[in-house]
Image (spheres, rainbow, N blue to C red):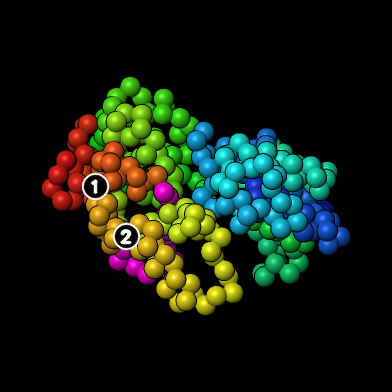
Amino acid sequence: MIEDRSDRVCVIGAGYVGNGLAYALKRAGLRYDQLEATGRIGGNWSHGVYDSTHLISSKKSTQYVEFPMPEDYPTFPSAAQMLAYLESYVDHFGLREHLELNTEVVRVWPADRNGTAGWYVELADGRTRHYKAVVAANGHYVERNLPSCPGEFSGLQLHSKDYKRPADLGTGDRVLVVGAGNSASDLAVEAAATFGSADLSMRRSYWFIPKTMVGGIPASDLDRVWLPLPLMRFATERLIRASVGDYRRYGLNRPDHRLFSKDVTATSSLFHALLHGKVRPRPEIRRLDGDLVHFTDGSS
């Protein structure tokens, strides 16, 4: 039996975006249900980050406009502070009333060819509901993306989503981090601080942006959507050059793509670790052989 809720909107997810959308619907006087697969609000901040995580954007550029972060929060709040902020946002605007925790959505499909007659939402417990509209805010970090490498590795393999603290890396003293996004950069630095050094394998070149630019201004505070992209790119590249200089000084390759055409990595600690020899850049993995990893430059 299909439950008729065609008078309301279905919001999937209770993370940063889902909560903001829920409040927007409530403020507009629209009926809605908010469904969250887990038992907590907060999305990735409640179940997918490590203990030492801090925002890569400043609190000023991250906070909801209608609900500023507490004055005593630092410029780059911790994961615990971010989660507490999201929970206080939900409570402040009374969003729990229409929030259903532990309610996983497994399938969504249109009631007609183009969705104008509404959408069917199937839940993990077998129930199906009919809504007039659906907003998917389930997050793009919900699934683990694991690289496929030839060969077999005999050591411990761990995805960053399953990492919480250095003890999770086991008893060995050699750590290879694959990838150079924000999480990978943080984990390489943290592993190096714990075990003395770490290697960082990169399949491609990256744009690395320091979290603070010239004058200590957070890089995210310089992002102005009203500036034309070419002007924003021109200004940011020169600020990077003034702040960190040539990437080759750190053993990194110069980016082979234009700034902002792909995701950037915001980090300040990685530059420090590279200059001190704590983190060693490595190229792409060619193959795995037991506890040995071979790279495309012939090293292992």
Task: Decide whether residue 4 is among the magenta residues.
Answer: no
Q: Nearer the viewer, mark 2 or mark 1?
A: 2
Task: Kindly identify which numbered label has been placed on residue 245.
Answer: 2
Q: CA distance from mark 2 to mark 1?
A: 20 Å
Task: Place residue 200 in its image quadrant.
Answer: top left
Q: Is residue 26 visible?
A: yes
Picture layout, residue 25 above or below residue 41: below
Residue sitting at x 74%, y 52%: 67
Q: Quadrant of residue 190?
A: top left
Which region shows up in magenta? 255-268
Residue 90 placement (x, y as % from top left) = 76, 45
Per the image, the residue denoted by label 1 is: 282
Q: Amino acid at mark 1?
A: Arg
Q: Amino acid at mark 2?
A: Gly
**Earlier residue among tags 2 and 1:** 2
**For the view shown, which residue lies furthest in the left direction?**
298
Residue found at the far right of this picture: 29
